[in-house]
Image (spheres, rainbow, N blue to C red):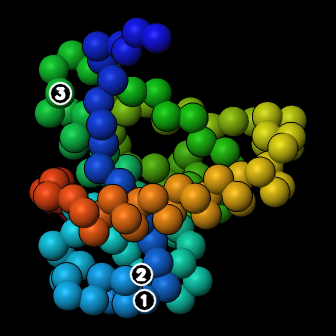
Amino acid sequence: MRQCRWIRKVSNFKIGHSKKPKCFQNLEVSELCFKYHANQKAWMNTEIFFEWLNSFDQYISGTKNLSVVLLLDRASCHGSEENFPSLKNVLVLFLRANTTSFLQPMDAGIIACIKRRYRNNQVLSALNSDDPVYESTV
């Protein structure tokens, strides 16, 4: 399989329950190779999403001749089209209401299993990584 030349690797962004998770015992959150936020339910909210979106737009702006289309569902954490921040290189399009169930019919157990494995691999990767954290100027 050929890899496209325009593929870029973007740093991960994680949300957890604890401000300093036990799995990062000897590390400060600022030393991790990804941006980390914590809140009581470990859920994305509009403030965190807009911070990520602005830093993602800055990352894309630093790449020559690259624009991105980002498709979002109507989750409350994504905010509404009226209060969206102005972005230079990211075009945000919202899916129509009630289309998620048609687009993600196997959402129930399969995605949960994949998420568990993915998160486990992310933690292992973060603990073994020497990559620097990308800087957010937000």
The image shows residue 28 at horizontal and vertical percentages of 19, 83
Using the numbered discs, state the Cα–Cα distance from disc 3 to disc 1 in whole angstroms: 34 Å
Q: Secondary structure at mark 1?
A: loop
* Residue 68 falls left or right of residue 138: right
Number of residues whose C-alpha sits closer than 10 Å to that of mark 1, classed few (under 14), some (14–19) or many (20 or more): few
The image shows residue 59 at horizontal and vertical percentages of 22, 40
Using the numbered discs, state the Cα–Cα distance from disc 2 to disc 3 in whole angstroms: 29 Å
Q: Which quadrant of the structure image shows residue 68?
A: top left
Residue holding disc 3: 63
* Residue 76 falls left or right of residue 63: right
Picture layout, residue 75 above or below residue 31? above
The residue located at (21%, 16%) in the rendering is 65
- Give the number of the disc on residue 62: none
The first of marks 1 and 2 along the sequence is 1
The residue located at (30%, 64%) in the rendering is 126
Q: Secondary structure at mark 2?
A: strand
The residue located at (29%, 30%) in the rendering is 8
The image shows residue 82 at horizontal and vertical percentages of 54, 49
Q: Nearer the viewer, residue 11 or 113?
A: 113
Residue holding disc 2: 38
* Three-letter code, disc 1: Ser
Q: Where does the C terminus fall, quadrant-wise?
A: bottom left
Q: Is residue 24 visible?
A: yes
- Of tags 3 and 1, the one toward the viewer is 1
Residue holding disc 1: 18
Q: Is residue 39 visible?
A: no
Q: Are marks 1 and 2 in contact (CB under 8 Å)?
A: yes
Q: Secondary structure at mark 3?
A: loop
Q: Which quadrant of the structure image shows residue 58?
A: top left
* Residue 58 falls left or right of residue 21: left
Picture layout, residue 53 above or below residue 130? above
